[in-house]
Image: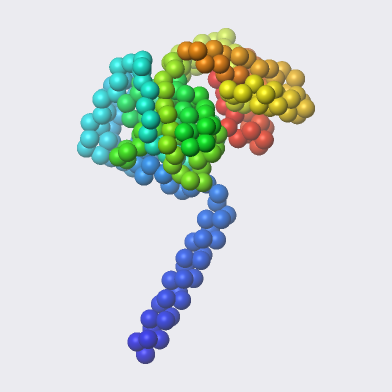
Amino acid sequence: MRRFIILVSTMVALMLLSGCASLNKLNPFPQHIYSSGGGYSSGKSGGTVDRSGKTKPYTIAGKRYYPLQTAAGYDTVGTASWYGSDFHGRKTANGEIYDMYGVSAAHKTLPLGTRVHVTNLENGRDVVLVINDRGPFVRGRIIDLSYGAARRLDIVQKGTAKVRVKAIGTAPSPTVTMASSNKAYQVRVGAFANRNNAVRTHRELRRSGHRGARIATIRNNGRTLHVVQAGTFSDRRQAERVLRKLQRQFPSSYITS
């Protein structure tokens, strides 16, 4: 009788595991973050954050963090992770709404708004993005990427990768951007070190009907990037409509101004 009970219990456990696997296949995006604690915006990590400044100290799970006063000279190699649907649509540390399909990242100490160049040292892929959140709060990890950025670096499946993070500048404050009355909003599809990749993407946009698509070449600290834009718009809502259509074909597209 005891053997029969053990056998039945084992079969039930296997069925439950099988059911969980089936559910996971239906949802391709993780319901957790690989950093297991990055992105304090959910309010689950027990921390308090002062969003009024880019470099003010903050506390997470009883530990005090002191952000750098400047990102100048920051160039570090370490492990990157990424976070996704658990935080999609919630506020980030600088007050923006987290878009998992966009290109952004969380960092413990870089000033919010820092533009960084992230290179996956395992495959050579790279991306330029802005730090708009805090994390990852796990020992040994230096940056938490958005899902869109992780896709660009091809680390979604693996979850983590060895990367180089180099600060290259500062992005405009989102509060300043939104306050201006005559802003132009650019819908960007991506930034490429290889111009041929940028040209191919530009052609795809033109074929899809985006006649305002263009390639802007940016040079910063001796590095050249070819930024592909689907168009420039004076109305934020119009830019958002274009972005929603683009994300079906180009999931990592984003709006800047």
The quarter of the rendered structure image containing the C terminus is: top right
User: Where residue 234 sits in the image (x, y, percent)?
Assistant: 63, 14
Q: Is residue 90 left or right of residue 237?
A: left
The location of residue 219, given as percent across then percent down, is 54, 12
For the rendered model, the colour scheme is rainbow
Closer to the camera, 125 or 143? 125
Q: Is residue 243 left or right of residue 204?
A: left
Please provide percent x and percent y for residue 221: 47, 13
Instruction: Kindly indicate the quadrant of the structure image that contains residue 113.
Output: top left
Q: Residue at x 35, y 23 (%)?
A: 110
Image position, residue 40 (x, y; %): 35, 36
Residue at 48% x, 37% y is: 122
Question: Please, is residue 48 above or below residue 13 in the view?
Answer: above
Which residue is at a point 55% across and 61% down the rendered structure image?
A: 22
Q: Quadrant of the N terminus?
A: bottom left
Res 43 → quadrant? top left
Residue located 77% across and 27% down the image: 207
- How many badges with numbers are in the image? 0
Give whichever of 80, 88 is nearer the camera.
80
